[in-house]
């Protein structure tokens, strides 16, 4: 079975994001970029399935700027077999929208014919949480979202998913789309020998035109602002004073 894993280049989760002075977006100058953490978990899940003898090839794909090659090389160093880069924009400030990404992935799936697509549940830059679900709809495949456990049994995938009320275990027919959550696994670090080997692994470069997909944005960001700072708290001297403040100032009771 072949597994396809989409990965995205995002601002590293350790970086404190700064908004541009003119409010036009996030400042990306000299900012460390890395693979989306949920996508790292997806790559690790694919690797573990291959190590268990349930997959024979792992293909990673990234859609965005040319610098996304670095993200793909990281996935290859972790153990993926080959990579596909779809250079959809030359502007690092441009974020390809989920529907366009899903259409491109659907075209890749048509060419690669994987038995399973494992995605991160969302990207930490826009928190859309939509690409996996849209891809499922476009392909007409089953889907299992927010996976915290994943197992393959014959022609089905058994997925334990995190829901508001706790955990839900479902069985979906394959081929399927699985989006993964934080608690599925702990991604491995790429060793130095594997990093060197990754430089020689195949990386195909494509464009949206190769797949006949229009990635023109349909949304426009009007303004970006930082969250308002929290006001300092106050100490109260008694329960009666607390109740009075909750009632008169906060208006919550």
Image (cartoon, rainbow, N blue to C red):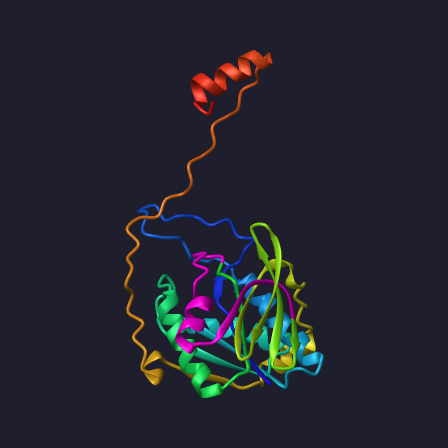
Residue 82: x %, y % from top left:
55, 83
Which residue is painted at 35% across and 66% down in the image?
Answer: 91
Res. 87 visible in picture? no
Judged left or right of residue 114, residue 166 is: right
- Residue, x 71% and y 79% (percent of image)? 52
Depth order, front residue of 196/9 = 9
Q: Is residue 244 above or below residue 189?
A: above
Magenta range = 124-150
* Near-viewer residue (193 or 214): 214
Q: Where is residue 109 in the image (x, y as percent from the top left)?
A: 46, 82
Pick whichever, 15 or 40, lies toward us. 40
Residue lying at 69% horizontally and 78% vertically, measured from the top left: 193
Magenta region includes residue 197 = no
Q: Position of residue 51 (x, y in %)?
A: 70, 79
Q: Where is residue 227 in the image (x, y as percent from the top left)?
A: 42, 40
Most extreme residue toward the right is 52
Residue 148 located within the stretch drawn in magenta: yes
**Closer to the camera, 132 or 167?**
167
Q: Quadrant of the N terminus?
A: bottom right
In this picture, residue 84 sits left or right of residue 148: left
Total numbered circles:
0
Confirm whether residue 169 shows in the render. Answer: yes
Answer with the quarter of the image where residue 218 lies.
bottom left
């Amino acid at each position: 079975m072949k597994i396809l894993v989409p990965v995205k280049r995002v601002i590293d989760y350790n970086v404190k994001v700064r908004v541009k002075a003119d409010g036009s977006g996030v400042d990306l100058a000299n900012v460390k970029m890395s693979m989306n953490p949920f996508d790292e978990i997806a790559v690790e899940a694919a690797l573990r399935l291959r190590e268990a003898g349930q997959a024979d090839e792992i293909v990673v794909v990234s859609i965005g700027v040319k610098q996304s090659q670095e993200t793909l090389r990281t996935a290859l160093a972790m153990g993926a077999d080959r990579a596909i880069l779809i250079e959809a924009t030359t502007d690092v400030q441009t974020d390809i929208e989920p529907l366009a990404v899903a259409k491109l992935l659907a075209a890749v799936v048509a060419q690669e014919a994987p038995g399973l697509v494992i995605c991160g549940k969302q990207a930490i830059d826009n928190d859309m949480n939509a690409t996996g679900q849209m891809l499922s709809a476009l392909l007409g495949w089953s889907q299992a979202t927010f996976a915290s456990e994943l197992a393959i049994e014959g022609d089905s995938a058994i997925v334990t998913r995190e829901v508001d009320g706790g955990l839900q275990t479902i069985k979906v027919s394959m081929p399927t789309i699985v989006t993964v959550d934080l608690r599925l696994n702990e991604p491995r670090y790429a060793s130095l020998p594997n990093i060197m080997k990754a430089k020689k692994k195949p990386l195909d470069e494509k464009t949206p035109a190769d797949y006949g997909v229009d990635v023109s944005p349909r949304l426009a960001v009007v303004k970006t602002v930082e969250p308002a700072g929290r006001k300092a708290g106050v100490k109260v001297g008694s329960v009666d004073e607390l109740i009075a403040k909750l009632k008169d100032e906060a208006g919550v009771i």
